[in-house]
Image (cartoon, helix red, strand yellow):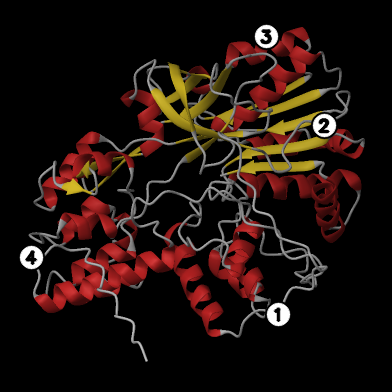
Amino acid sequence: MTVSARPAPVQFLPDTAPFTSEQRDWLNGFFAGFIAFTDGTAASAPQSETIAPPLPSGQPAESDDDAPWHDASMPLGERMQLAEGKPLRRRMMAAMGQQDCGQCGYNCQDYADALFKGAEKRLNLCVPGGKDTTRTLKRLYEEKDSQAAAPASTAEPGAVSQRTTPALGSSRDRPVDVAFLSRRRLNSSDSDKVTNHIEFDLNGSGLDYAVGDSFGVFARNDPALVDAVIAAIGAEPDFPIADRALRDALLTDYSLGAAPDMLFHLISYLTGGERRQLAKALAVGEDPSGDAAALDVLAAIRKFPNIRPDPEAFVESLEPLQPRLYSISSSPKADPGRIALTVDEVRYAIDGRERLGVASTYLGGRIAPGSAVKTYIQRAQGFALPADRSTPIVMVGPGTGIAPFRAFLRERQATGAGGKSWLFFGHRRRGTDFFYGDEIEALHRDGGLTHLSLAWSREPGRKKTYVQDRMREEGAELYSWVDSGAHFYVCGDAKRMAKDVDAALAEIVATHGGKSAEAARAYVTALKKSGRYQADVY
């Protein structure tokens, strides 16, 4: 009998790494297992170029009671409680961020289905869900592995599940380069925020889009942050990582945001005593010091000073740098060859250190006109203008939520759409934060925008007013529009604004439609099911 030789273990750490032999053996095995489990996303392996196949035809549908957990404003714990007792793939769906934003390359249900079937093994793609979703999916994935094999497909003989390679530029896995054109600040210099109108040149890229779609941008980390991280781990910027220098890899491939569990696992093997116990607790989602939510990668390293991880082990412990999706604020008919975004620069301070949004500040100042950016189009899922251009529309989009509605209005103007339109816009102060104000007011004067309702929450000496307050004030007319067939749209913050707008609409239906609270909620639910109430939330 011939005995096959056992393959030599994969060595992720060099013999010169600052570990004992036992630590080095454990870490090599740990990273090998992790990479096999996550299909290499912790490393800089190429992304899959396939879309998960559909569920086998003939497989019994799983009742999910219209997915009551599919609510972006609902906390993860509540969603998981509602999904308790449901099939595993539905509980995986409940763990998602519930925005159907497409940043993972799927919608929430399709991502869950792909994980359940094994067509997708990356558990860390849900950007809105973050670490909590990743941890929950890991637990559910372990449950999947412990179950018996799934029943055989009842598809007809000869039927084959097809995997389709997406076209270039139509997926996060198939980005294309486009040229950055320009940025223009939308609020005045005395505003306490910075919001930019960003434009890209699509000529020669092969990209096309429709209003309602989103634009995916692969940004780069802040060089100052990268340098600070390298200094904190005591490494050299040119340390080789595969065929690249450490600094280059950290600039483009790895997230330096929320510190991942894997980083704390690594730290626990580089320290001892109470510090080791602290790192182990953080690695499993505990928060002994009460600061876990504030720990980005740099803060995590500084919390455990004087550790000197091997740079290869360090980067393997990080998450990949994810693309950022933005609602498109231009129309291909009104702005041929160009695409525009409306982007708030994210800046805030924790413990005296300024934190920066990766993509927002990259677009806001770290990239020069003419530079190439990797991008893709994320097709909208149920967020589009009515096919009948005479159908009235109501748009609620405070702050950067104005983006798709600027696109809607420009498209309607370019195509001569005759239906009525109503925009609810709000922000802090009219004098500093009325994005596209001149453009919108001109449309209103000329009849391209039938009705304009504005809400300002920080006007000196005035009561705070939000878009949902304006909706209630004009509730009778708003109900008349909706009840007569208007399509209702909302874009913006999923956790607060969109939830408040949803509640306000239900109140308006109850008050002006003469319905009970329960009947009003059923009315709003019916609008959503029919496609007349559409949301683009984040």
- Answer above or below: position of 347 versus 283: above
Residue 249 x, y percent position in the rendering? 26, 43
- Answer above or below: position of 328 versus 309: above
Kindly identify which residue carries mark 4: 18
How would you rate the neighbour count of disc 3 (Cα within 10 Å): few for under 14, some for 14-19, many for 20 or more?
A: few
Q: Earlier in the sequence, mark 1 or mark 3?
A: 1
Q: Residue at x 17, y 63 (%)?
A: 13
Q: Earlier in the sequence, mark 2 or mark 3?
A: 2
User: From this viewpoint, which residue is outermost toward the front?
Assistant: 1
405 or 444, which lies in front? 405
Kindly identify which residue carries mark 3: 442
In the rendered structure, which amino acid carries the disc numbered 4?
Answer: Pro
Q: Is residue 440 left or right of residue 291?
A: right
Q: Residue at x 42, y 64 (%)?
A: 38
Residue 431 x, y percent position in the rendering? 50, 17
Q: Is residue 449 left or right of residue 379?
A: right
Q: CA distance from mark 2 to mark 4?
A: 62 Å
Q: Earlier in the sequence, mark 1 or mark 4?
A: 4
Q: Earlier in the sequence, mark 4 or mark 3?
A: 4
Q: Earlier in the sequence, mark 2 or mark 4?
A: 4
Circle 2/circle 3 CB separation < 8 Å:
no
> Where residue 151 is drawn, which disc sits there?
1
User: From this viewpoint, which residue is outermost toward the bottom?
Assistant: 1
Foreground disc of the pair 1, 2: 1
Kindly identify which residue carries mark 2: 386
Q: Quadrant of residue 185?
A: top left
Q: Earlier in the sequence, mark 1 or mark 2?
A: 1
Q: CA distance from mark 1 to mark 4?
A: 48 Å
Q: CA distance from mark 4 to mark 3?
A: 66 Å
